[in-house]
Amino acid sequence: MVAKLQVRAAAHGGRCMGAERGPGAGPARPGSLLRQTSWTKGAALLAALGTAGWFGYMTSSPLEAAVVDGSAASVGDEYRSHMIMPLALGGDSGRHMGATGRVRTLSSAPERPVENIVATFREADSLPALLGRAGLSSRDVADVTALLAPAMDERALSPGTAFSVTLGERPEGAAHRPLQSLEFRAALDLALAIERDGERLVLRRQPIAVDSTPLRVRGRVGASLYRSARAAGAPPEAVQEYLKALKAHIDIAALGANDTFDLIVAHRRAATGEREAGKLLYAGLQRDSGGAVELMRWGPHGAFYNPRGLGEERGGYVQPVVGRVSSHFGYRVHPILRYKRMHGGIDFAAPTGTPIRAVSEGRVTGAGRMGGCGIAVVLDHPGALSSRYCHMSRMAVRHGERVTRGQIIGYVGSTGMSTGPHLHFEIYRGGQLINPQQVRFTTRDAISPAELARFRSQLQQLTATPVGAALKPLPSAPAAREGEPLREIDRLVEQRKTV
């Protein structure tokens, strides 16, 4: 039977696997063709089942995200308590220790032996109230207040002043801790400290060196005078004063970009680094086209004067009293005589006792009762002008006295021919009545000849201040050593190297 199969395969051209065998090869094993066909079918079936299972599992619906636990932050903090945090980041390893074998639960938390507090002086605050908020007992408050009273003025404390308070261990059964120390800055040139010495408190003063060299700032006006001055280092209040002082003498809008501003400001600097900027002392301006403006603060009112001793020129109509106009200048029916006649002034209705002020500088040439005008004051002004103020309740000046613009010369009343409290105000030019509302008084403050030499000497001394002199290091100020580390972590590393 086997011989017949071999002969049949050879007759078909050797298309069976046994026909490819070389000469001398043995006969093909029965069933080899069947086994090859079964393996191929099995492999194909396996591939088909795997593909069907894959596509059946995969869907087009979105995947559901994991639910976020709201306590993730607290859980993270628990993990952080077991970690070693970098010292450069503060070494913070969480709000508490990890639950190790060395951690035990206490029945009650022990009180700190020492408590450090920083109390801040508030607006409209008082020293006893601040000490009470810091936790001092009434006895310590009284002792501290008594010690500080002769050393400082409590009214001079500025809001924001920090008080460093150290409280000691609380005695058995006591409600308050005893004060151990108290430190604060009473002024720019004074630091005060109170320390406990046995059963009593002791005051210790620490004077601080202060340099009062004025701060001088100079630069080009550029596109904006205010911005250029601020960029150069001038305090904002000083720049506003500077603009106000210049405006009284020149047109600010006409300034050029190449004009040079010059400010000198009162300045105090402590050896510990604190600074205080004061008022504007000098306002200067150098025009690029030529010409200059120099103004220096002088006198009790803080007005600015040029080197010739002349101040701001003021003009315009000035109302002598605060009140409404009840009767204008011109013909009217007299309220008492009941016939029409000329009213030679302006009436201002105001309550009795309202201050009456001089409309311009002048000299008192009349003061007293003047018939129907009642109690009145007459002032002579430059330019053949004079003014009269009638129906006063009382006067504030005497005959022959010189007065300044805005000075109080009397008070509203109803003396003389009057129907009620008011001021009758008159202006004369060359002895003739004129309408007060048409008069424009021009006045200019001037330094007296006796003070002019002293004024010019101080101006010369002030303008000799170099630019930036107030910013030089003070001899008593501590200076950082060259190469000294600035970060705390670097300081620790340096200390570790030296140990």
Image (spheres, helix red, strand yellow):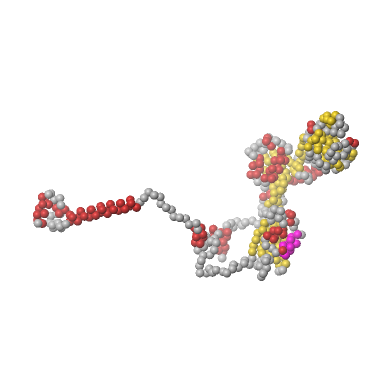
Quadrant placement of the N terminus:
bottom left
Most distant residue in the front direction: 338
Residue sitting at 72 percent across and 68 percent down? 199
Tell me if I can see residue 430 in this picture.
Answer: no
x then y, percent, for residue 262: 69, 42
Q: Could you tell me how many numbered marks the image carries?
A: 0
Residue sitting at 67 percent across and 47 percent down? 468
x then y, percent, for residue 497: 55, 63
Residue sitting at 63 percent across and 67 percent down? 113
> 298 left or right of 55?
right
Q: Nearer the viewer, residue 73 or 462?
A: 73
Res. 173 image quadrant: bottom right
Task: Write down the region rendered in magenta.
Answer: 139-149
Residue sitting at 12 percent across and 52 percent down? 9
Q: Nearer the viewer, residue 456 or 235?
A: 235
Whether residue 223 is situated above or below residue 331 in the rendered picture: below
Tell me if I can see residue 246 in this picture.
Answer: yes
Taken as a whole, is the magenta stretch helix, strand or loop?
A: helix
